[in-house]
Image (tube, grey):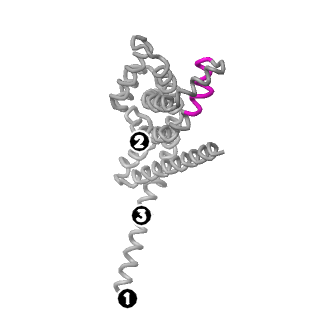
Amino acid sequence: MRPLLAIIIKGKEVMFESLLDHLYSALITDSRYVLILRGLRNTLIITFFALLLGLAIGLILAIIKVTVHSRRNPLLWLANLYTTIIRGTPVVVQLIIINTSIMAQSNNKILIAVIAFGINSGAYVSEIIRGGIQSVDRGQTEAGRSLGLTGAMTMRLIVLPQAVKTVLPSLGNEFITLLKETSVAGYVAISDLTKAGDTIVSRTFDPTAMYLVALVYLVLVVGLTALLSLMERRLARNDLR
């Protein structure tokens, strides 16, 4: 038994040393960890500002869809057309079109990615917010109007706050989806987190860097999920009060 135990222990030591060698090559050699950190920074910047843009676009589109009832209204027609086109085409195709055509003269690749992902997210956010607004009882709107509030004030002060509580989980999921979708930003020569891992792999011929990238994405998603759950619990407590 002792020789067998010694073999097992020795094998584990060899595996551990091999893992350390892979990690050292993927991160430490030639300061490759800098690529990962820079890619993470770009990913977070793109995600954050694309989220803000998507929320703005989605809110405007949702209000148009809820408040405009005439099908002949050009605003409603444009809002529906926008949603159909954006949701019906892949985000990577939209990113490439914006980079090679609409904003071909721009050298700011981060800005291009923010606009592309923001436009894409806006179409999905609009449907989420629209559903939240329509879930609010019509009596709330009628009560606001009976108090002398204008339609805009009723929407801003009464309807939207209630809708936000309803759609928060869905908006959180959209935020997480947006974070993962930015992994295709490398198609327009942006050194995001995924591109950084791919660059290291091309230099080392070792997939360890991509495992690390996957781990970083997993940590971000789990952290965001926990944060959203905390926000939902606090909102639920406020409702009980």
Question: Residue tagged by mark 3?
Answer: 19
Type of amino acid under label 1: Arg
Q: Position of residue 169 (x, y in %)?
A: 50, 41
Q: Quick check: is 188 in the magenta stretch?
A: no
Q: Are marks 2 and 1 in contact (CB under 8 Å)?
A: no
Q: Residues within 10 Å of mark 2 (few under 14, many from 20)?
A: many
Q: Secondary structure at mark 1?
A: helix
Q: Amino acid at mark 2?
A: Lys
Q: In what quadrant of the picture does the N terminus appear?
A: bottom left
Image check: 34 left or right of 12? right
Which residue matches tag 1? 2
Which one is nearer the viewer's eye here, 82 or 129? 129
Q: Is residue 214 visible?
A: yes
What is the spatial separation of the Cα atoms under label 2 and label 3, in whole angstroms? 22 Å
Amino acid at circle 3: Leu
Image position, residue 238 (x, y; %): 64, 43
Q: Earlier in the sequence, mark 3 or mark 1?
A: 1
Q: Left or right of 223: which side holds 204?
A: left
Residue tagged by mark 2?
Answer: 195
Q: Residue at x 43, y 56 (%)?
A: 25
Query: Is 182 drawn above or below residue 80 in the view shown?
Result: below
Label 2, label 1: how far apart the Cα atoms are? 48 Å
Task: Give the quadrant of residue 161.
Answer: top right
User: Residue 64 appears at what percent x and percent y?
Assistant: 48, 19
Relative image position of residue 92 (x, y in whole percent): 36, 32
Measured in 3D between alpha carbons, the distance from the residue under mark 3 to the one under mark 1, in whole angstroms, is 26 Å
Q: Using the image as rendered, state which of residue 231 and residue 46 is in the foreground.
A: 231
- Does 156 appear in magenta? yes
Q: Residue at x 66, y 21 (%)?
A: 147
- The disc at residue 180 is none
Whether residue 117 appears in this view of the structure is no
> What are the residue bounds of the magenta stretch?
150-162
